[in-house]
Amino acid sequence: MPAAPAELVTVRDFLRHAVSRFGAAGLAFGQGTQDAYDEAAYLVLHTLHLPLDRLEPFLDARLTAPERAAVEAVIARRVDERIPAAYLTHEAWLGEFRFYVDPRVIVPRSFIAEALAERLSPWIGDPDRVVRALDLCTGSGCLAILLAHHFPNAAVDAVDLSADALAVAARNVADYRLEERVRLVQGDLFAPLAGRRYDLVVCNPPYVTAEAMRELPPEHRHEPVLALAGGPDGMDVVRRILASAARQLDSHGVLVVEVGHNRDIVERVFPTLPFTWLSTPGSADGVFLLTREDLAGRDNLV
């Protein structure tokens, strides 16, 4: 482990040191934290095995020599290798839910998670009547697990093309003891589901445009390209979902898809669809909702 500078003694010292180094290095954030201070606090507290929501009581605590070396090592890796914090700690949080992550999956961050916290009211009238739910492009399984939590009567299918991603999802499903309610399925979108119909389908698909892929900061290049790249206009996977979703939704079914900052592209590519854009704490236009009725008879979207 690298030796910490002798001047750094307390948690407060290392917090300031980390923020300064992160700023000087021009690190990119947005993979679980939004700025240098939040990321520094998270990494310091996690490395010291301290509660992540209680920084103040420990600010003036003096670190032991092994603790100083451990904190300096994680700061150095974050700066020198530009590894996302979640991959350094092997954990990511969506609200109060913790998930195991590694470079086989993108770091969980989803406006859909915020919408699910409200159980998609008022578009889902009675959450207890959702008995079949689907998470496409499940990755780490985080949204499938949230579906199971917020819709307690639902059996959840979670589909991903990547066997590596499903291995991570299996660990998270087991951590939440949801093996009997969340079924992991390897395959390409709806293809492996044999015509099953669902009350609710959610998807956080690859939607990064080709131009944006070329401009990704180093942190995001640690994530699997398969989970990010959405083709020239970011809509390759979205087109295929919208072309098939009506056949997979029950008569009262709802589709929810995340598209990041691509609302203008979505509305230009699909001008006839009556999108409802969900407002969440993190976004006013990053997630759209369509009902089966909205999608019926529109099989010419690809």
Image: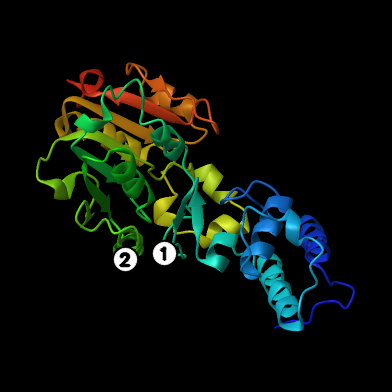
Name the colouring of the figure. rainbow
Residue 269 pos. (x, y %): 39, 25
In the rendered structure, the answer to whether residue 91 lies left or right of residue 165 reads right
Q: Residue furthest right?
A: 7
Circle 1: residue type: Arg
What residue is shown at x 63% (from left), y 64% (from top)?
Answer: 50
Q: Which residue is mark 1?
A: 104
**For marks 1 and 2 on the same chain, the one whose residue lies earlier in the sequence:** 1
Which one is nearer the viewer's eye here, 249 or 212? 249
What residue is shown at x 34% (from left), y 65% (from top)?
Answer: 171
Which one is nearer the viewer's eye here, 291 or 233? 291
Q: Is residue 217 above or below residue 262?
A: below
In the rendered structure, the answer to whether residue 55 lies left or right of residue 292 reads right
State which quarter of the image contains the N terminus. Answer: bottom right
Circle 2: residue type: Ala
Q: Is residue 144 above or below residue 67?
A: above
Residue 275 pos. (x, y %): 37, 20
Q: Which residue is mark 2?
A: 167
Q: Residue furthest left?
A: 194
